[in-house]
Image: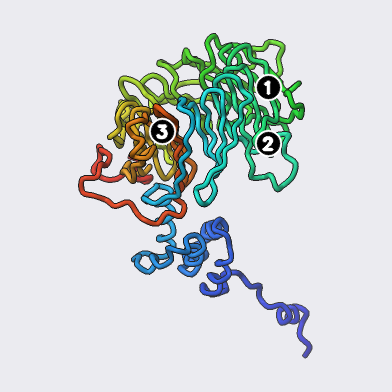
Amino acid sequence: MAPSPSESTDLASPPPSKITDLNEDSLSHCASYLSLQDISNLAMTCKFLKRVSYSDSIWQRCFSERWPNEVARISSTSSGVRDAYLARHASMHQFKFVDPLSADLYTNAKPFDHIILDKNDVIFSQGSSIQSVKIDSNGEDSVVTLSDHNARITCMRLFPIYETSLYRSQSQIKENVLITSSCDHSIRLWWKGSCQRCFRGHNGPVSTLSDKLLGDSSAKLLASGGEDGTVRLWSLSSSAKRGQHALKATFYGHEKPIKLMSVAGHKASLLVTISKDSKVRVWDTTTSSAIRSSCCVGMTCLPGTPVDMKCHESLLYVAAGSSVGVVDLRTMQKVITAASYQPRLCSFAIVPSKSLICTGGSGKAMLWDIRRNQEAPKAEPIAELDGHTGPVAQLHMDPYKIVTGGPEDLYINVWETKTGVQTNSLMCCHSEDARRSSGCSALAVNGTRVVTATCGEENGIVRFRDFVNASCPVLKHEDEHSSKFWDPECYSDSSTE
């Protein structure tokens, strides 16, 4: 008897194969050709593929490619190779080594106003002069001086070049442009060591620039605030060298000079500004109105002199006076006092993904858990990061580490973000220069890199360090200084109560 049509189909079409039909060894071999990001994505698909993506063979390849000289250390670890990779990666980002790549640059004996890191490029300002220093893999440097401004630099920002009119091809996708503001009433856009655009319009010194660009990808706007109390929006798509027609809007409303500005996290068209009298305004930059102050869609006021300000999602974190207040930008109501330190705050940083903030005060910094303080009648720190001399005016914070420094202290200290435990202490100059140098006047951190600036009687010193290939760990001592904890156990993300 001839088979029926359905039976013929069954015989001709074997059951479909799934990726999970392969054994773990075969899948591990295939996955070893993936990038680290793809391996992480694979681990989030299902339990079976998560187990595959944790295989030692995959992480052995990742480790040997990343740190070929450290592969021998894997055999001495009791945990898996993946754990060894992650531990090494965290230690590198927490500066837990004594042998980073280092480079020192000696400059004029002038105060440092700003310093930023763009990969291995160190950019800093002294008065009206900007210097860009490229550090190569051997620690050698090459210096370019940018001197078009004729008064003190007030703010420096880096933005991707693809968000400007200078973008031409995919080969530029990872490049940044530098934008600076100055007391000479101008804003300048720099690329490849020269000024490409100059924007003028403020009736006085330009005091600050927005931390992000406003708007969608087709029409990015830069916001600036001035001593004249105005907020101005500039198009970065303008191709004119002198920035003609770049000024798109001017907002009025502040009675005092603009101190800080930040783009809202939940809506890229909202700009938050705060003036020196601590009055906060929120501007809808898409609104077009003949009444120039009607673009203001929210106002509030906080006590104390503004120190710093950060937006995350729909919340605004403002460090002013002796406290950090959190404002809901949808209602303009203060929802919590996240931190409080007397007599005043000197610096502020936040890692929103971990609900942690850090504040700098006199002689120490403090670590705060926003979630714990939501229910507490009074904000209390979870750790004190002490040991500094004078105010902690320089502060960096990321998911791995906190870096603290101040103008009266020649050392910067490094701490674990989760625990507040000190991991390293780094000097801002050579020991022979210590007597002639002041403390840390500027600080920038980017991943495994850190750069400090200190000014002495005879010269200024910019010190660059990169821990990416460091191999000699910091030795721990019984008397090593560590943070003071209110709780006996280390803080973790799971402890929310």
Q: What residue type is labelled 3?
A: Leu
The correct choice, above or below, for 136 with respect to 279 in the image is below
SS state under label 3: strand
Question: Which quadrant of the structure image shows residue 255?
Answer: top right
Residue placed under numbered mark 3 in the picture: 395
SS state under label 2: helix
Question: Which quadrant of the structure image shows residue 173?
Answer: top right
* The residue positioned farthest toward the front in the image shown: 458
* The residue positioned farthest toward the left in the image shown: 479
Q: Which amino acid does label 2 sit on?
A: Glu
x and y percentages locating residue 397 in the rendered image: 43, 38
Q: Which residue is drawn at 56% across and 13% down?
A: 227
Left or right: where does residue 8 sit relative to residue 482?
A: right
Is the Cβ of the residue at disc 2 closer than 8 Å to that at disc 3? no
Q: Quadrant of the N terminus?
A: bottom right
Q: Residue at x 40, y 61 (%)?
A: 84
Q: Residue 486 carries which label?
A: none
Residue placed under numbered mark 2 in the picture: 163
Residue 377 appears in the picture as rendered: no
x and y percentages locating residue 490 in the rendered image: 29, 45
Q: In which quarter of the image is the C terminus?
A: top left
**Residue toward you, 70 or 221:** 70
Left or right: where does residue 304 sit relative to residue 376?
A: right
Residue placed under numbered mark 1 in the picture: 199
Residue 436 appears in the picture as rendered: yes
Query: Going from the N terminus, do you reach mark 2 or mark 3 first?
Result: 2
Q: Dot 2 surroundings within 10 Å: few (below 14), some, or many (20 or more)?
A: many
